[in-house]
Amino acid sequence: FDTPLWVDSGMEKLRELVIAKAKVSVVEEKKKILEKELREVSIRVNLFEKILIPRTQGNIKKIRVFLGDQELSSVAQAKVAKAKILKKKKESVA
């Protein structure tokens, strides 16, 4: 008990300061991690919004056109086949 009383309170305040600095350091590290993750997520979102989604929409349009063309082609082939069948029936009847 050779030290003055203020030394004990000073040591306690110093201990509190060290703990507070450690907490601030942890929070800053968490902030850096979150900022990095936010950048990565932003890059992915931009990739989807600006590249992948428009490309996919374009591909969907191409597929729709192709399927529409296929449908028209099959209808036309069916009409031609029907006309040939009717022509053969007329020839066989006559």
Image: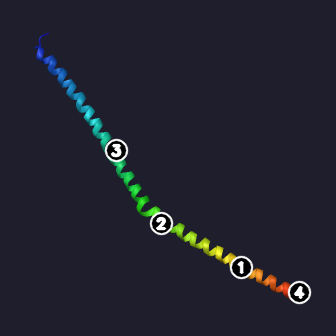
In primary-sequence order, the first of circles 1 and 2 is 2
* Residue neighbourhood size for the residue with mark 1, other residues' Cα within 10 Å, grouped as few (<14), some (14–19), many (≥20): few
In primary-sequence order, the first of circles 3 and 1 is 3
**Circle 2 SS class:** helix
Task: Tell which residue pokes out farthest to the top in this image.
Answer: 1
The reply to whether callout 2 and callout 3 are in contact (CB within 8 Å) is no
- On the image, the x and y values in percent for residue 21 come to 23, 32
Q: CA distance from mark 1 to mark 2?
A: 33 Å
| Disc 3 target residue | 34
| Disc 2 target residue | 55
| Disc 1 target residue | 77
The residue lying at 39 percent from left, 58 percent from top is 46
**Circle 1 SS class:** helix
Q: With 54 as the anchor, is 21 left or right in this view?
A: left
In primary-sequence order, the first of circles 3 and 4 is 3
The reply to whether callout 1 and callout 2 are in contact (CB within 8 Å) is no
Q: Amino acid at mark 3?
A: Leu
- On the image, the x and y values in percent for residue 3 come to 11, 14
Q: CA distance from mark 3 to mark 1?
A: 61 Å
Q: CA distance from mark 1 to mark 4?
A: 22 Å
Q: Amino acid at mark 1?
A: Gln
Q: Amino acid at mark 2?
A: Arg
Mark number for residue 92? 4
* Residue neighbourhood size for the residue with mark 2, other residues' Cα within 10 Å, grouped as few (<14), some (14–19), many (≥20): few
Q: With 68 as the anchor, is 36 left or right in this view?
A: left
